[in-house]
Image (cartoon, helix red, strand yellow):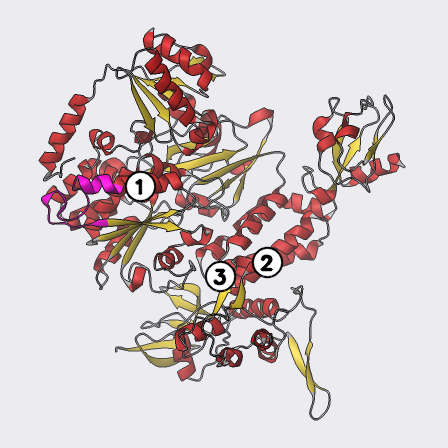
Amino acid sequence: MRKLQSTSDMEKLRKELLRKQDSSKSCISICSGTGCHAYGSEKVVSAFENELKKQKLEGKVEIKRTGCHGFCEKGPIVVIYPEEICYLQVKIEDVKEIVSRTIKAGRIIDRLLYTDLKTGKVVHESEIPFYKNQTRLIFGNNRKIESKSIEDYIALDGYNALGKALSEMTPKKVLDEIKKANLRGRGGGGFPAGRKWESVCNAPGEPKYVIVNCDEGDPGAYMDRSLMEGNPHSVIEGLIIGAYAIGSHKGYIYVRQEYPLAVENTELAIKQAEEYGLLGKNILNSGFDFTIKIHRGAGAFVSGESSALMSAIEGKVGEPRPKYIHTSEKGLWDKPTCLNNVETWANVPFIINKGADWFKTFGTENSKGTKIFSLVGNVNNTGLVEVPMGITLREIIYNIGGGIPNGKKFKAVQNGGPSGGCIPETQLDLPVDFDELNKVGSMMGSGGMIVMDEDTCMVDIARYFVKFLSQESCGKCTPCREGLRHMLRILDNIADGKAAEEDIKRLEELSEFVKEASLCALGQTAPNPVLSTLKYFRDEYDAHLQGECPVKVCKELIQYYIDPEKCKGCGLCLNKCPTGAISGEKKGVHTIDVGKCIKCGACFEVCNFDAVSKISGKERNLKELTYN
Amino acid sequence: MKNISLTIDEKNVKAQEGMTILQVAQSSDIEIPILCHHEDLEPYGACRLCTVEIIKNDKTKLVAACCYPVEEGLIVKTCSERVDKIRKIILELLLPLAPTGTLYALAEKYGLCECVKKSDEESEWRMIKELRFPAEKPTYCTLCGLCVRYCAEIKKGNVIGFIGRGVDRKVSLVPEENCGFCRDCENICEGGKFFSLLEL
């Protein structure tokens, strides 16, 4: 590796790299993101390596371990280039056939292709509806490059924006471009990045720091993780450009320890960038110095809050502090600090390369560009999706997500992580941008999107998120700690059927209190799941007060019941019951002793005749009568 | 230091740049209730009892007076319906945890309890309304952190610390570290926890 001396030197390297790439040569690209990894993609890679050896194709076919492709529902994903043939859910047993039939004979194996319900088999990755309906600016390169290769990134115009900024633009011009693009922070708050950069730039005090926040802690969200793992150089390039604009010479990447692959790939990426002279002293001979250090987070959700994150880097407990003086003036070690989320930084090279005007063609008036969402829950196509701001929730869930599985009905979508709100079906045509989501009591957050079907109990959901937040709160300020403690207590009582109307009033009062009086954004947004479910699903709360869980989820309010008309007396439930609560003669009707039943649901799962059902509320009283 | 003038409860007051709302209020004899604040320690902003309303650029905001630095022309309301409601709930939440004189005296101001004379020498605190947020059992600790911070900032001892997170947060002694048994933590504690901790 040689140190690059100038942008033309980098251009020369890029040309060399492109020349070496033989576009006619077959390349097997295998997703090595976290999802596919968990499905065993690494074993598939080894199987391909062995198979190529066996079939004497070693060296003639390239194997690439890429970053996350996003369609995690169908992993491991294998794409064969140059034809871009996409095979899904590839197993070790499929490898031999892929090599002999597709690589050698150029034939397509139908059973491994994506099946569209309307149009049938889809050969090319980009034609699968999940991908076709997305706009993959930031995330698109993830599947094209090997995550551990800086050369792959450079070949795809990587570090071009850095070269352009350092050689053609003044720091002020870079700053103006970001401001003009109206790039808003992707971490949750949506604060304009350009304005933040500017205040750090103008704040008195040296040195100035820049930080990447990769402490993504929302349950079910993993877009920052996938970017950091799959394409770390895009984030690093954005960070260097930002540092140049602000006048910072020291950056931190805060990665949670639970993301070992992100830590590994980022460490390697920093090392590679240093070797090429893209980090360190006198970058590309511009006179600009910049170094990056990785800080591994110790796994606290609250450390994603900027002031808490900075405390953690300082070696203190990750607890938020009052930000009446902004961290852009007094941040890390009381010095001006610019903290942005992974995705925000990754947007920067695109804006510099293609210009603010190009960037502004995506999105809505006040929310420009795209946003990556982690689409999870009761949705057919689970995965990471990148869409232009302003797209509706319906388009994301149905066109990209493929709708709700098992013929169930949609009930709600929870946006923005644990402190987001639950949005009902009536709001599905809402355009997704920072301001619109706030209006309906939810938020963009970092981009978590949990889809829930009709079998979801909204009281139970509110309880789940409040429980999560009460445990993940730092516990420093009274409203968040004690407020959430008592909110959870009330929600427990509601779910257990032990609450009355006044408890809901108390819950509402506490929610408003926690929202208004808490120290940091964790507490200020924590009541959102409660307030939004109360707003849109009040009838479910009321039903619980009457002793009924309408979707039969809350254990205390349900009972298992064997329908004497349907029971065949096969004895399967009787054998499965762990507490001996079921009795009955062979071929005779079985019954459940409610006193002994622990409501584990084993009988319900095992019955082949749909004879076991869950009952709640009034129904329960009626059925109880028929029992006796 | 720059001189600043601002309005607190419709009274014009003078201050110096860098002062907090609480400091300015105290120097102008305007009372703001506090619990986790101590003038020798860095502002902490945890109990939120000193929450006040400020009006800035025609927008009303709630801030902790102990931390918020004053600005020219700032308008502060130290009590309002909104502020009182917050303080009342804070005390309703904390009093069952630390039913001690300090907390009762604060709660009395918000109409939660009263001091009833039993005889010439004896009086006792009595709740006016039923407690809405009872604690499982009193911990005699509001987690105000005065002991932790006093030990760390003034005594440079770091003998006391917080353990746990969220609802599981507790104050704990680490006696094997250099505790000199100065008992300052006991004196600074308003909840009474340290009495029991040190006696153990």
Q: CA distance from mark 3 to mark 2?
A: 14 Å
Q: Residue at x 71, y 26 (%)?
A: A606
Determine whether A459 is above or below A67 in the image: below
Say which residue label 3 marks. A518
Q: Earlier in the sequence, mark 3 or mark 2?
A: 2
Say which residue label 2 marks. A485
Amino acid residing under circle 3:
Ser
Mark 3 and 1 residues: CB-CB less than 8 Å, in contact? no
Determine whether A42 is above or below A297 in the image: above
Residue B133: x, y in percent?
65, 64
Q: Residue at x 68, y 50 (%)?
A: A494
Say which residue label 1 marks. A266
Q: Earlier in the sequence, mark 1 or mark 2?
A: 1
Q: CA distance from mark 1 to mark 2?
A: 38 Å
Q: Which residues, given as a range, are shown in magenta?
A: A270-291
Question: Residue A272: within the magenta?
Answer: yes
Q: Is residue A24 visible?
A: yes
**Near-viewer residue (B152 or A391):** B152
Amino acid residing under circle 2:
Arg
Mark 1 and 2 residues: CB-CB less than 8 Å, in contact? no
Question: Residue A160: within the magenta?
Answer: no
Secondary structure of the residue carrying numbered label 2: helix
Q: Total of numbered circles in the picture?
A: 3
**Near-viewer residue (A325 or A253):** A253
Q: Earlier in the sequence, mark 3 or mark 1?
A: 1
